[in-house]
Amino acid sequence: AQSVAQPEDQVNVAEGNPLTVKCTYSVSGNPYLFWYVQYPNRGLQFLLKYITGDNLVKGSYGFEAEFNKSQTSFHLKKPSALVSDSALYFCAVTDSGGGADGLTFGKGTHLIIQP
Amino acid sequence: DTAVSQTPKYLVTQMGNDKSIKCEQNLGHDTMYWYKQDSKKFLKIMFSYNNKELIINETVPNRFSPKSPDKAHLNLHINSLELGDSAVYFCASSRGPGPDTQYFGPGTRLTVL
């Protein structure tokens, strides 16, 4: 069974400061990890993913995430936060077991960027 | 052009009714999914289809029946609606199964009264 933990319900950051949204995962095979963002009353937008290769993955809107196999983590980061980054962020995982496995999502983290 | 579209966007109905939600993708993808997002924003996979064949059927009541007439469409029919079915339902598609990025539709907010 696969699972994702996002330990923080909410993260508050001042505009211009760096931000980190935490994610840890558990899978039986090799992990494929994703970050999605959801704005109010909207669908999920893909930000970035880790499949293999470089542990630092760069994605949309200046976001990046670092895959850490030993800590089973895939934290989302951005060097300088914008007010427009305020949204609900989901970490998700599927494994390399094959088949059309759906994504297993974390419970989401509300990111609030204060002006 | 909308990549993954769903209709309707909002659906309000009475308990016991039967309703359908339609999903279409114009990305040429082979795999489509239905997810349910509850009032606490928790997202859970319901079904997955690959090339019109059912791959995943999570623990979902039999009242929920997906139908895939072709690779570009995955509809969700719900019989005998219950209060607990109230949620936002998202359709998604990916090029194939496994690690391919899933692209989500805008969601259908279902309210059962």
Image (cartoon, grey):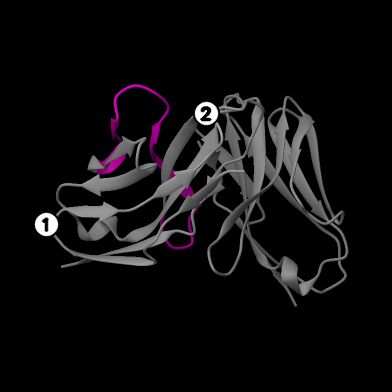
Q: Label 1 is placed on what type of residue?
A: Gly
Q: Residue at x 43, y 27 (%)?
A: A51
Q: Is residue A102 above or below residue B38?
A: above
Q: Position of residue B44 (x, y in %)?
A: 62, 53
Residue B84 seen in render: yes
According to the picture, the residue beneath numbered tag 1 turns out to be A16
Task: Assess whether residue A34 is covered by the magenta stretch.
Answer: no
Residue A72 figure quarter? top left
Q: Residue at x 32, y 46 (%)?
A: A75
Q: In the orientation shown, which residue stands out farthest toward the left? A: A16
Q: Nearer the viewer, residue B58 or B1?
A: B58
Q: Label 2 is placed on what type of residue?
A: Pro
Task: Assess whether residue A54 is covered by the magenta stretch.
Answer: yes
In the visual, does B52 lie left or right of A23?
right
Label 1 crowd bin: few (<14), some (14–19), many (20+), radius 10 Å:
some
- The circle on residue B99 is 2
